[in-house]
Amino acid sequence: MVTMSDVARLAGVSKMTVSNVVNERGGVSEPVRRRVLDAIRSSGYRVNVSARTLKSGKTGVIGLAVPHVNAAYFGVLAEQVIDQAGRRGFHVAIEQTGAAAEGEIEAIAYSHTLQFDGLILSAVGLDPKDQRLPGGDFPIVMLGEQDFAAVFDHVGMPNEAGTRAATEHLVDRGCRRIAIVTGGDLSGVNVVTRRHRGYTEALLERGLPVDPALRETLGPWSAAGGREAAHRLVDSGREFDGVVAVTDSVALGLLRGFADRGVRVPEDVRVVGYDDVPDAEFAVPSLSTVAPDHRWMAAKAVELVTARIEDPSRPTGEHTAPFALRERESTR
Amino acid sequence: MVTMSDVARLAGVSKMTVSNVVNERGGVSEPVRRRVLDAIRSSGYRVNVSARTLKSGKTGVIGLAVPHVNAAYFGVLAEQVIDQAGRRGFHVAIEQTGAAAEGEIEAIAYSHTLQFDGLILSAVGLDPKDQRLPGGDFPIVMLGEQDFAAVFDHVGMPNEAGTRAATEHLVDRGCRRIAIVTGGDLSGVNVVTRRHRGYTEALLERGLPVDPALRETLGPWSAAGGREAAHRLVDSGREFDGVVAVTDSVALGLLRGFADRGVRVPEDVRVVGYDDVPDAEFAVPSLSTVAPDHRWMAAKAVELVTARIEDPSRPTGEHTAPFALRERESTR
DNA sequence: AGTCGCCACTATATCGATAAATCATTTCGT
DNA sequence: ACGAAATGATTTATCGATATAGTGGCGACT
């Protein structure tokens, strides 16, 4: 392995000068600079990032911790974050938390040990009051779900507004008995309750009753879960002409489940999802959905985490992504 | 920041003893071990990975470089690799290459500087003869696509066998004019030509003609590309009763494109894909597809890269994943 | 002339952990 | 009972880069 000393010897200068050239710090005359660059090229030298990190305390890496890398919305997010971080000279390392508080705490702890400069955490299991949460000493941006605004920066989705728009859209299309397929923790303030509130508010505003029987809960927010929920909705004989799904994965599962039972979408039932995953556009029927601006979210998250890396004492803030309602075949 | 020396002072031992406790190296008496562990707990000490890496030369991190993190099959792969690597005590850092030789070379170079212990590279743009490729000095496992078996370990997909099985399946279902939707480099030996060969071989074996007019090419292997290909196939008036798609993404696009034109699947045309992405099962109609064993591939790749990390001089090998044909509604 | 300031570069001391060598003690074999 | 081996802990010398202080030389200003 070629070290900086080797290059220094080759160029006939001190290794500090090599360091200055490598890091473009200036104060090096042009002929010497050229000699050093030549020596670097001919020796095939590469900086040892561990050594640099050890001395400087900065890694140039931002951690991105998500519930499952194998989830539809994750790819969109990761791609944007990698892109945005790259523009600011940061690399991104991806962690998987398993959608549990355990894993999320682990990711935070690991961030310290691996010495990420900052962490973007898409937390779903973590409670804002969890005692294992670190203080404000490490740059963390919470993404998408729970609201930790008091302690950390938070980039959230338009949960209530989005679901309200989705529900209103169904009403506008003539739906009168609108079901909601959701699941998880229905107490406190979180994604589930917020999206649920958007739904009830829209119904009340439009003068429609909120029927608890039209709330179908599911376990994992997956296509498989959605499919089974659709089966239960149909098989139970409940009457409904529209469904709001908590995510697109679930909505795509619903489409499948309705197809299993011979229920036509949108003729018999209209369906609207949330996320605008890539597949939503290509489903049959294509899926109407709430499309939060993922690019905006990624850009904001990276902006916040890099800002906090530079100035750890800046005040935290709460930011909500804009969204659009994509009207497609499933509500036509 | 708490260092090992701080812990040593607190426990009244040398820092080497602390190191021995932290790394479970043994040779430490139980009472001293306990004292050190207490000191670690009370001080909140965490090892500094940069320092450890600098000295030991090992990072405990395996790089996983893929074309786009935002691709259907990637999630499945990444999840498996993370899981398998975790079992062996490695973490996984994900890189994005942008599906170009440039990015792939970059990923390899970066692996050195970030000092990954090894790299699993899903190369699509790189030529096996590229001069920028490093020698056998760094543990690299090529995944999925090109065949670099002479220089690197390679875990491949059953390209020919899989597509042959898919094509034969269509024939068994009564298809006689089977189109193939593919794209990219049709010369040399790569995914495209291999899958294409599986298709032609199956047709010839079953005594069916190979009609070049039934080969529809596309640009990016995406759902959007598949959708457009379906439009072209239908609008051109070519007659066909089955389609083999080069990937599931393309196949899902085909389903969408046929729906646009009122072509029924499987009644009018049967469709089979390749990959068995999670959505294939939930599409309407659900997609018949070649399902390479992703878990097997991930396990093998991790096994190979860790083996080479331990013994860099071991001979390279070529490994092909087993597969299953999932028969679903699109060919029923 | 003196000295102040600047420039280009060098010397030295770390950053935090660990491999290898060393040093006390015990324990053991014969 | 004495040397050999085993045990438990410490010392020392790095790993490769960089922050900081320092050096010599030269022009400029008073």
Image (cartoon, coloured by chain):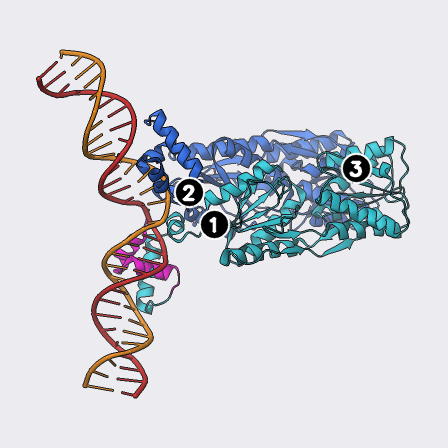
Chain colours: A blue, B cyan, C red, D orange
Q: Secondary structure at mark 1?
A: helix
Q: Residue at x 38, y 64 (%)?
A: B25
- Residue B24 is one of the magenta-drawn residues: yes
For the residue pair A296 and B146, the one nearer the viewer reads as: B146
Residue at the spot of label 3: B256
The segment highlighted magenta reads B1-25
For marks 2 and 3, give the CA distance: 48 Å
Residue at the spot of label 2: A49
Between circles 3 and 1, the one closer to the viewer is: 3
Residue at the spot of label 1: A105
Which amino acid lies under the numbered mark 3 shown in the image of this protein? Answer: Arg
For the residue pair A67 and A62, the one nearer the viewer reads as: A62
The chain that hosts pointer 1 is A
Image position, residue A316 (x, y; %): 44, 34
Specify which label sits upstream in the sequence, 2 or 1: 2
Same chain, labels 2 and 1: yes
Q: Are marks 2 and 3 in contact (CB under 8 Å)?
A: no
Dot 1 alpha-carbon crowd within 10 angstroms: few under 14, some 14 to 19, many 20 or more: some
Image position, residue A177 (x, y; %): 76, 38
For the residue pair B210 and B80, the one nearer the viewer reads as: B210
